[in-house]
Image (cartoon, rainbow, N blue to C red):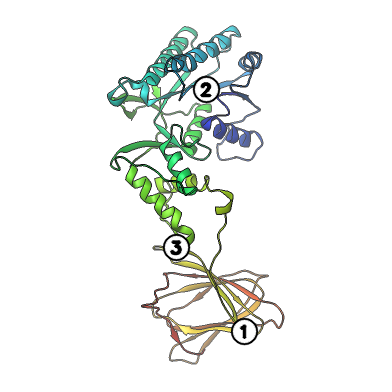
Amino acid sequence: MKILVTGAKGFVGRNLVAQLCNIKEGKAKCYGNVTVSEVFEYDIDSTSEDLDIYCRKADFVFNLAGVNRPQNPEEFMQGNFGFASTLLDTLKKHGNKCPIMLSSSIQATLQGRFEDSEYGRSKKAGEDLFFGYAKETGTKVLVYRFPNLFGKWCRPNYNSVVATFCNNYANDLPIQVNDPSVELELLYIDDLVDEMIAALKGEEHHCEFDDVETVIVENGRYCAVPTTYKVTLWEIVTLLDEFKKQPETLIVPSIPNGSFAKALYSTYLSYLPREKASFPLKMNMDGRGSFTELIRTIDKGQVSINISKPGITKGQHWHNTKWEFFIVVAGNGLIQQRKIGTNEVLNFEVSGDKIEVVHMLPGYTHNIINLSDTDNLVTVMWANELFDPNKPDTYFEVV
């Protein structure tokens, strides 16, 4: 398929074009049988000749072009309705009845707080134009009314509070929250792009609107992304506070699949400046080597890296309840474990040449010995719980 994307350099356009190019180049195989042979990128610096060529060749059109923050309100109609007219006239000129998607806004409902929205009126005019075009030509038209969008590459201090907050937290700039209880409906860019690629395959989701609420229905007039998040400003700020502290606490927040927190964390990271893209860790060093905590979690334990110098033995302790994984990634060593109160010793020879996991069993005193005379032994260690100095559950005893 040859795909035309208008507004290709905008927030949504950049993300969509990137994924379409991944499909074209065979890098994204998760979308099944969809194929992309060309991606036509049209934006404000393109020419009318470009648009003419693209409209003649396109097999599918994503119309993402529009105006969000004009200097004069009348520019809403010119930018959102005017270009849509030009686009449809050009397709009509070439007799191209390929499917076309329109990026509209929830503000086009003109309900509730959007009742007097000039932006909403311009989007509604664009919708009516597209529906009229569909009726006149028989073309398949998909009209999406988007709520607030967020994700990587979204412009801060423009029309996304999430982008602004993420950018400001990442760059140590202040934020302003007038009413923390305000609830937003948010749509994550990856979910949106997945839906648009589904639309290429004729698998779009349809909806109707109850006031400003999206109601997914099989034969709805409009289209929608079925996954959105309703969160308050306070919830956003609370999560961003947690994310920002991660380099100090090493605690990775709870970010389950499908959660708003996961999408927000990825978005926040995309705004980090270069100097924050890496951060130092505290290495606890002595004559035997070093021990460094890498990652801590609230309920999934912690990961550390242990370096033992040649000939060194570390450990020689046991736990009642705590258990650990030892994973040697470089060097050659011996892990020994002895059940408390017995003389039975379990021996495990370990090497970075054959990476494996060895359980440190509760009730077994254990050690790890660097067998090399020249090379360090490097071990990744995972413990099922965070170290608590007030209840370490660690008792010295030689294996």
Is 35 located above or below residue 65 in the figure?
A: below
Three-letter residue code for mark 3: Thr
* Residue bearing the label numbered 2: 65
Q: Which one is in front in this view, the residue at disc 1 or the one at disc 2?
A: 2
Q: CA distance from mark 3 to mark 2?
A: 43 Å
Q: In the figure, 14 relative to 79: above or below?
A: below
The answer to whether residue 167 is above or below residue 136 is below
> Considering only order in the chain, which callout, 2 or 3, is on the residue closer to the N terminus?
2
Give coordinates of residue 394: x percent, y percent.
43, 81
Mark 1: which secondary structure? loop
Q: Earlier in the sequence, mark 1 or mark 3?
A: 3
* Picture quadrant of residue 386: bottom left
Residue located beneath label 3 in the image: 249
List x then y, in percent, for residue 195.
Answer: 48, 32
For marks 1 and 2 on the same chain, the one whose residue lies earlier in the sequence: 2
Q: Amino acid at mark 2?
A: Ala
Residue drawn at 37 percent across, 42 percent down: 176
Label 2 environment density (alpha carbons within 10 Å; few <14, some 14–19, many ≥20): many
Query: Is 182 on the left or on the right of 223, as rendered?
Result: left
CB atoms of marks 1 and 2 within 8 Å? no
Which amino acid is tagged 1? Answer: Ile
Q: In the rendered image, which residue does mark 1 sit on?
A: 312
| Discs 1/3, front | 3
- The CA distance from mark 1 to mark 2 is 65 Å
How much space separates mark 1 and mark 3, taking CA atoms? 30 Å
- Please give the label number shown on residue 390: none
Residue 232 lies left or right of residue 279; in this view the side is left
* Mark 1 touches mark 3? (CB < 8 Å): no
